[in-house]
Amino acid sequence: MPTPQPPCAPLKILSCDAARPMARTVARILGQPLVEVEETWFSCGEGKFIIHENVRGDDLYIFQAAIVPAASGARPERSVYDRFVMLLHAVEAAALSDAQHITAVLPYYPAARQDKRKGRTREGISAGLFARCLQEAGATRVLCVDIHNPAIAGMFSPDRCRLENVSLTHRFSRWLRRQGLCGDTVASPDLGGMERARDYAAELKTGLVGLSKERDYTSTSTVLRSTLIGDVDGRDVLLVDDMIDTGGSVVAAVEELKRHGARHVTVAATHPIMSGPAWDRMDALATRAAAEGWRFRLVGTSAIRHPDPPDYYREYAIEPLLAAVIEHINRRGSVTGAQQGEDRS
């Protein structure tokens, strides 16, 4: 067993208000107190962030949640952009406080789907804009989980800031197996997600199928149809994706799987955004499953935590993985080793 390396600098954890429950859990696992901070929003909508403890020379991890679902369908108090700007305030406060290393822990990277122009020349590439903002504020590393496009790492200047994209595949797969939700076939909802689905199928030792998704780009978040590539007749299917937004892709994929004879269907996503009509669509699938005598399960992670979820929803906690990754980074160890380890709480 290799000798543990000494820490690169004293480890400290702090959090923006939106991510405090996650940061508190990670800090507890690591045996660290949260650094005392103050997040303030003025009546005009402007915000500021103050660090109340000395962090000079420290290895600092700043948590933020880009998306925080509101209870009972209420409108969120702060937008994705509000929270991102508050993260910039926190990163700059840490830089001006002379922290040695500053890692922005942002499990869901906002604008990750806006990583290219997709044939439309008069639009921005927001994933790159956000990368430049973070490194200009003073971040030396950004830690995400299952980012939509790993190539976003190339939008950071490696001599200033690096993207650490943490893969959930190994630990999530083991948890799905223990919960009896892995099925015997893994499916991808679109061809772009086939590599992810292939990794899950290899981890779970199951079959693999794919779906070809046809979108209506004249409307936002509209899927016209999905077409199955492979055989699912009589099989229990695990449909895996990195995120669920409005749920249109999920509905189209499940309908196509059932049309070709799939038995039970579990949908698993790292980032269950569940915006707009998503919950109504999932409720309709659950109602249909109950009426027709098959099982529907929806699995998300604590990257985006939902208050009072329905009984068909299951949540996997990512905090033990984040704690392991942070510990390995701080001690100059292997992030791959942290991803392959076992959860601890």
Image: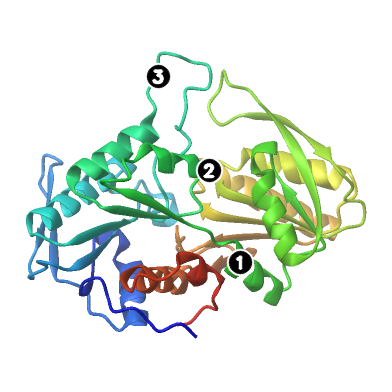
The correct choice, above or below, for 327 with respect to 106 in the image is: below
Out of 239 and 200, give the one closest to the viewer.
Answer: 200
Q: Nearer the viewer, mark 1 or mark 3?
A: 1
Q: Is residue 46 left or right of residue 114?
A: left
Question: Which disc, if any, is residue 123?
Answer: 3
Q: How many labels were placed on the picture? A: 3
The correct choice, above or below, for 55 with respect to 198 in the image is: below
Q: Position of residue 104 (x, y in %)?
A: 29, 55
Q: Amino acid at mark 3?
A: Glu
The correct choice, above or below, for 110 with respect to 223 in the image is: below
Question: Which disc, if any, is residue 170?
Answer: 1
Point out the tag, 1 or 3, that comes first from the N-terminus.
3
Q: CA distance from mark 1 to mark 2?
A: 23 Å
Judged from the image, the secondary structure of the residue bearing numbered disc 3 is: loop
Q: Amino acid at mark 1?
A: His
Residue found at x 67% / y 47%: 195
Mark 1 touches mark 2? (CB < 8 Å): no
Out of 194 and 188, give the one closest to the viewer.
Answer: 194
Residue beneath label 2, please? 245
Residue 279 visible, this angle: no
Out of 30 and 334, give the one closest to the viewer.
Answer: 334
Q: Position of residue 229 (x, y in %)?
A: 83, 39
If the image is split into quadrants, where does the C terminus sit? bottom left
Residue found at x 44% / y 14%: 121
Mark 2 touches mark 3? (CB < 8 Å): no
Q: Position of residue 50 (x, y in %)?
A: 9, 59
Q: Quadrant of residue 221?
A: top right
Q: Nearer the viewer, mark 2 or mark 3?
A: 3
Point out the tag, 1 or 2, that comes first from the N-terminus.
1
| Mark 3 surroundings within 10 Å by alpha-carbon count, few (fewer than 14), some (14 through 19), many (20 or more) | few
Q: CA distance from mark 2 to mark 3?
A: 21 Å
